[in-house]
Amino acid sequence: MAAYGLLATPAFAQVGGIDLLQATPQANYVRLPPKPSDETIPQGAAVPLPDMTIRDDEPFAMEADEVGYDQKNAIVVAQGNVEVVQGANILSAQKLVYFQRLNLVKASGDVSVLQPSGDVYFADAVELKDDMKRGVIRNFRARLADNSVFAATEARKVSPVVTQLENAAYTPCNLCKGVEPFWQLKARDVEIDEQDETVRYANAHMEIMGVPMMYTPVLSHPTPDASAKSGFLTPTYSSDNNLGTLVQVPYYWRIGPDKDITLTPWYSTDVGPLLEGDYRQLTDGGNYSVQFSGTYPEELDNDGREIGGNEFRGHIYAQGQEELSTYSRVGFDIQRATDDTYLRRYRFGDQRYLFSRAYAEAAQNRNYATVQGLSIQGLRVTDDANTTPLILPSFEGYYETDPYDSGLTLHAFGNAQSLTRDEGVDQHRLSLTTGATLPFVSEGGHVFKSTVSLRNDLYRTQDILINNGTQSYTGNQTRFIPQASVEWRYPLIRNIGEDALTIEPIALAVAQPTGKNPQEISNEDNRLIELTDTNLFSLDRMPGLDTVDSGSRFAYGLRSQYLFAQGTAIDALLGQNYNVDDETPFPNSITPGENASDYIGRVAFNYQPVTFGYRFALDRENLASNRNEITFGYAEPWLRFDAVYRSLENNRYLRDSEEAILNAAMPVPYSDEWSVYGGLRRDLTLDQMVATNLGLVYQNECFSLYLQSLRTFTRDRDIEPATQFTLRVGFKNLGEFGDY
């Protein structure tokens, strides 16, 4: 450890070099003489010339206005702007005396030492002996590399790794003349253990702005430059309707250099104790983590009423991956909870689904292969574990050749999947797609891309209901889906001063057969179907494989971008889809049989400090808004604000919805430390609030305070609408510290 290395600084630890130094009035760069033997040197003996051979591990030099050597008594004296340098260690003083026979060094007058770590130490006088392993420093002061400060009336080096301070004070806060630091620790006795990287206090008290606020007979914390150390972290205090008054006291345990764990007991007035844990480990080729919690509260019914007895509730999130090579790895991701509402009731998240999987994957350039197993836990009131599917195994791979001289590339995509349930449809799938893509750019700048492919599917389906649920079907289904497409783009670019404007008309023609979605194939992976600016010009607009985007179609539109010289931009897109066959599954509109889709588009604007985005679907007949998503952001040091508005109407696959989300944060006027923030989320379809929050933050260079009020308005079984208050404080170098 370097933080307290002054007390055994290597600038004095070894000496060697010349036999005689005569006092000179000018500055000198010299080597200290070797320690003499006990035999007296006879007067008049021959004196050898200075030996400049480096005998120490690092070069050693001293500069002073005057340097002298008493040969008879083996005493080196340096006076006036003394500076001793060895490697990256620099000691400065007005006077330095080295008694070689006593192995004693005394330095006085504005003593300071600069360490390689950047720490600087100050003292009125220093007296060190036994190769500088022990000694006394009077009026000790130290400014460490992180700007924290130690001060003591006396410092004693009692061993090479232990220093004791008397009447000491410590603060990581900025110091201003005549003003008390924001907070400081004071103690009669302080021990600094360099080997253990720990500072221990006896009879300590904390002062905040000069006022004593807390006393403790014992206290310890890591040294400011220590590696991660075990110990208690900052507690959190909160209160709400579901958990009552809650205190969380985390303990960090440094198990080893490659692993650690944080254990956080919860003490609640309403639901009893809970233990939360977060384990982390690194390996040579991977990493692992496990987050878990468990409690044994009173058993509740769906309305949150106690029904007698206790039940275990908890959760586990576990992640891990291990690199097998530069291009491959294996891993797992586990998410499970004991029941549907546990995570939200105990503030571990608001997920509606939990996914667990084990996988092996490899990727190189555009080629990849993945094999995995997937388990799903639904947390909605309508979810049934018996009908929730298990996907095991699932394989997916893609291969693409390097371009030939003509630019032609060949590709192949394969998928195999087995989906089973305890009750309901089981389905097994094998799919293979092969194809080729040929790009072409004309002399006039027209960009073409032609693609042909053939998809082959084989399905084995069991217990699927067909004919409006009147029959159950078990059997095999095959389908062959040829596809050919041509995409055309014509980018037009014009420089406007230092800016650039791009206008690019684009068209896509896709030819493929219809009627490739038989009712004997269960749609398991295409439940959310929506035509947006992200898939308008995609060859396959479906998110999965079970339902095919069949039928020939055209997509056409215009993309443009205005790029400012400083890198900000305005981006826009407008387009439409036209289906040749009016009996296709894709929702061009809410009315089946319409060939032309809504007008699809987006506008994005990024010109700091403002960001703006608008994504839309406008009805082709009356331009009514069937889909809106508006985002707005503003970011300046004095104000951060973002807003989101979403609405969806007239979609055959998704329910109508409308919501607004607002968040803002700003500093308190005329203050660099205080800031406030707040936000809300409102369901405009139901015309009710979902959640609101308001917070107050104080943070300076050594202290932080976080106070938040959160109000939720929804009920889900044993989760009531609640108002939650949270308080958390942080002291730099005493547990956690940082931005909230």
Image: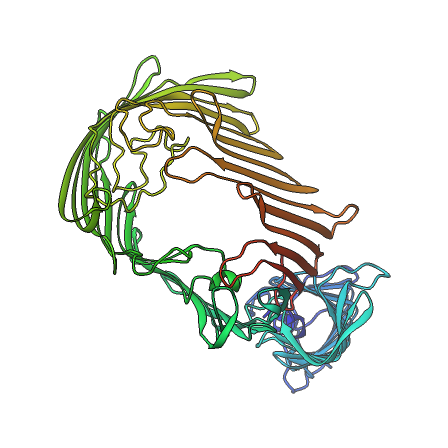
The correct choice, above or below, for 657 with respect to 556 in the image is below
Give the image location of residue 120, x and y in percent.
70, 64
Looking at the image, which residue sits at the far front?
470
Q: Nearer the viewer, residue 588 or 735?
A: 588
The correct choice, above or below, for 513 with respect to 128 in the image is above
Res 357 seen here: yes
Q: Nearer the viewer, residue 92 or 706?
A: 706
Q: Is residue 562 left or right of residue 70?
A: left
Give the image location of residue 194, x and y in percent.
60, 75
Res 104 seen here: no
Q: Tell me how the rendering is colored.
A: rainbow
Residue depicted at x 78% and y 60%? 175
Q: Which quarter of the rendered picture does the N terminus lie within?
A: bottom right
Give residue 338's quadrant in the image.
bottom left
Looking at the image, which residue sits at the far bottom?
39
Q: Is residue 619 left or right of residue 449?
A: right
Give the image location of residue 664, x and y in percent.
65, 44
Residue depicted at x 61% and y 78%? 161
Residue depicted at x 54% and y 21%? 499
The correct choice, above or below, for 554 with respect to 353 in the image is above
Residue depicted at x 24% and y 35%? 402
Give residue 372's quadrant in the image.
bottom left
Give the image location of residue 347, x and y in percent.
53, 61
Q: Which quarter of the rendered picture does the C terminus lie within?
A: bottom right
Q: Nearer the viewer, residue 445 or 724?
A: 724
Looking at the image, which residue sits at the far top?
444
